[in-house]
Image (cartoon, rainbow, N blue to C red):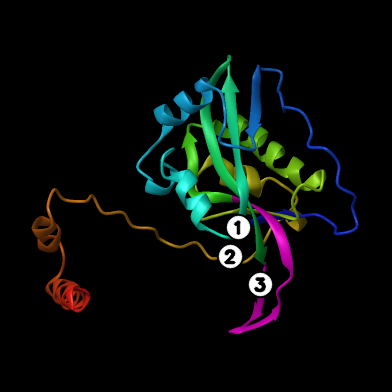
Amino acid sequence: TTVGWRSRWRPMTRPGPEVATQRGTRVRVARSLDEPAPFREAWARLQGRQFATDPDVFPLILAWQPQTLRPHVVALERGGEITALVLGRIEDIRLQTRVGYRTVYAPRVRSLTVLYGGVLGDLGDEGAEVVLTALRRSLACGEVDVLRLRNVDTGSPLRRAVGATPSILHEHGAPATVHRELAVPSSYDAFLGSLSPSTVKSATRYARRLEK
């Protein structure tokens, strides 16, 4: 989901300060991975099942992708404790506009992209609004041109917060897709046993090709 964009003619300003609410909820933004110990401890505590969001894997993925410029991680604090993290990255990409299968426009933009599965912990509706405000501040100050949320759960607080913004500010028509998960068995043989016969046949064939 593309949530917003800024005018190319708007001058860049310094990123704004922390966003706070009357109930003591606030966010902090990390623009590097050299953060204090409490930040890293919260990441380890909140990490779920997504491989790409693991605190040891995330830096490796950023380094492997040539379009990535740096990380952009938003921490939500309640009562002085980090209760949720939103993991993103700043990247230079081509934003494609297609008519059918044909690309008709593809400007190069600087994007703040929130990872698939990049919401760790419990945002809640109020926290999601605060986090979205912090993300959109990067647009307002000219730090990025586009804000993209990758495969956000349609029933999540962050998706509801996006839906509550003016419709002109976010993408329309992006279809919802089903994402499936598989619990990885303890062995390769057990994994093959969980698959259909045709899938096992294909996996075996490709494995033999790799061996050659």
- The amino acid type of the residue labelled 1 equals Thr
- Magenta-drawn segment: 95-113
Of residues 162 and 69, the one drawn nearer to the viewer in this rendering: 69
Q: Work out how far the residue at label 3 is from the one at label 1, CA to CA, in angstroms.
A: 13 Å
Counting from the top left corner in percent of width and height, residue 212 is at: 18, 78
- Position of 188 relative to 57 (above/below): below
Residue that sits furthest to the front in the current view: 212
Left or right side of 14 for 208: left
| Residue at the disc numbered 3 | 96
> What SS does tag 2 mark?
loop
Left or right side of 51 for 123: right
| Residue at the disc numbered 1 | 1
Q: Residue at x 52, y 52 (%)?
A: 63
- Position of 52 relative to 25 (above/below): below
| Residue at the disc numbered 2 | 174
Quarter of the image where the N terminus is located:
bottom right
Of residues 160 and 132, the one drawn nearer to the viewer in this rendering: 132
Counting from the top left corner in percent of width and height, residue 201 is at: 14, 76
